[in-house]
Image: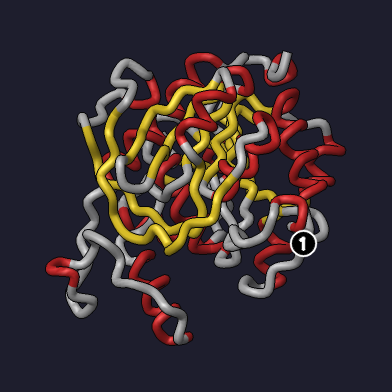
């Protein structure tokens, strides 16, 4: 079954060309089933690129998905056209005031790792989002900085600055093969990493109620389950396109920012070579498993979500 998105959203044409099943509102209305409502709270500056990445993954399941784009109420983006934001995004304040509920919500990362959480301009509203998910969202998926912020809010786990950026493709061990979120996963897998901060294993383990599902000896915990808050936190980037790390590397080189070649990314560590995607299958597995778990456990009556 396809993902339901507006026909004029850029992701519609992108995913159609890639063979991902998509449908518009008119087509969806003719199907007598309840789609899963999945929201994307997009904190990234490149909104359209991020929309495409997540829509691609959640649109690959056999279920109909109603995909909703959400933004912080007062925070303005300078990297995406105002008409795109006006046409496709709703401010969180409007969503919250409507009382509507969601089967799932993805909260993206943001390039603000160097800031303390309470120094982020929209931190107070984001904390409202986290608390709102407990009563209005069946399952929440915090990604990179979004996951770090959420685990800090609910459990007080701190992020720590790294001496140098963790940047490249790193092997991660499957720590919980029986987890339904890791169904079909290999014993280890390659995951793109791009961050200046880390969450430390002993602090996660001592917080209580948290289970580390994917872990790396080189770059630390990656995927954490928080059953109490019906949430997953992933600190790395399975959603990345094949060339996303390349774009980040080229940007930093052009700006004169000291940066090493992404580890284990370019063949022969040669930036002139075409990077290979070695994580796509596990990306689809993880997000497909998440959607499947939502489908199996979410109430048919959406008013019951959060109870």
Q: Which residue is mark 1?
A: 75
What percent of the width, then of the height, locates residue 173? Answer: 27, 34
**Does the image show residue 12?**
no
Establish if 285 lies above or below 17. Answer: above
Label 1 crowding class (10 Å Cα cut-off): few <14, some 14-19, many 20+?
few
Q: How is the image coloured?
A: secondary structure
What percent of the width, then of the height, locates residue 287? Answer: 41, 36
Instruction: Identify which residue is drawn at 33% across, 21% down.
Output: 176
Establish if 253 lies above or below 111. Answer: below
Instruction: Identify which residue is drawn at 66% across, 57% down.
Output: 88
Name the secondary structure under disc 1.
loop
Instruction: Identify which residue is drawn at 69% across, 63% down.
Output: 85
* In front of the other: 131 or 215: 215
* In front of the other: 4 or 294: 294
**Does the image show residue 36?**
yes
Q: Quadrant of residue 152?
A: top right
Establish if 22 lies above or below 152. Answer: below
What percent of the width, then of the height, locates residue 17? Answer: 34, 59
Instruction: Identify which residue is drawn at 53% across, 14% down.
Output: 297
For the N terminus, the quadrant is top left
What percent of the width, then of the height, locates residue 267? Answer: 14, 66
Q: Is residue 142 left or right of residue 59?
A: right
């Amino acid at each position: 079954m396809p993902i339901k998105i507006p026909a004029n959203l850029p992701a519609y044409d992108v995913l159609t060309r890639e063979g991902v099943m998509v449908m518009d509102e008119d087509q969806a209305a003719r199907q007598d089933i309840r789609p899963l409502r999945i929201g994307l709270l997009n904190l990234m500056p490149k909104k359209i690129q991020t929309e495409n990445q997540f829509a691609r993954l959640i649109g690959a399941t056999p279920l109909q998905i109603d995909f909703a784009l959400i933004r912080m109420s007062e925070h303005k983006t300078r990297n995406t056209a105002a008409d795109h934001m006006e046409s496709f995004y709703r401010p969180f304040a409007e969503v919250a005031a409507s009382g509507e509920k969601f089967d799932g919500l993805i909260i993206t990362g943001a390039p603000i790792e160097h800031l303390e959480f309470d120094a982020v301009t929209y931190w107070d509203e984001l904390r409202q989002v986290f608390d709102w998910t407990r009563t209005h969202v069946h399952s929440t998926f915090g990604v990179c900085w979004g996951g770090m912020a959420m685990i800090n809010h609910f459990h007080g786990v701190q992020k720590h600055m790294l001496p140098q950026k963790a940047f490249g493709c790193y092997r991660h061990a499957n720590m919980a093969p029986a987890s339904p979120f890791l169904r079909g996963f290999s014993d280890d897998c390659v995951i793109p990493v791009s961050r200046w901060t880390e969450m430390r294993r002993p602090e996660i383990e001592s917080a209580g109620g948290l289970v580390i599902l994917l872990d790396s000896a080189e770059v630390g915990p990656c995927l954490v389950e928080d059953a109490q808050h019906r949430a997953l936190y992933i600190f790395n980037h399975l959603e990345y396109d094949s060339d996303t790390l390349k774009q980040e590397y080229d940007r930093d080189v052009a700006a004169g920012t000291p940066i090493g070649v992404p580890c284990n990314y370019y063949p022969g560590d040669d930036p002139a070579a075409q990077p290979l995607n070695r994580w796509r299958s596990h990306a689809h597995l993880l997000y497909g498993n998440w959607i499947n778990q939502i489908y199996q456990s979410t109430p048919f009556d959406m008013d019951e979500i959060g109870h």
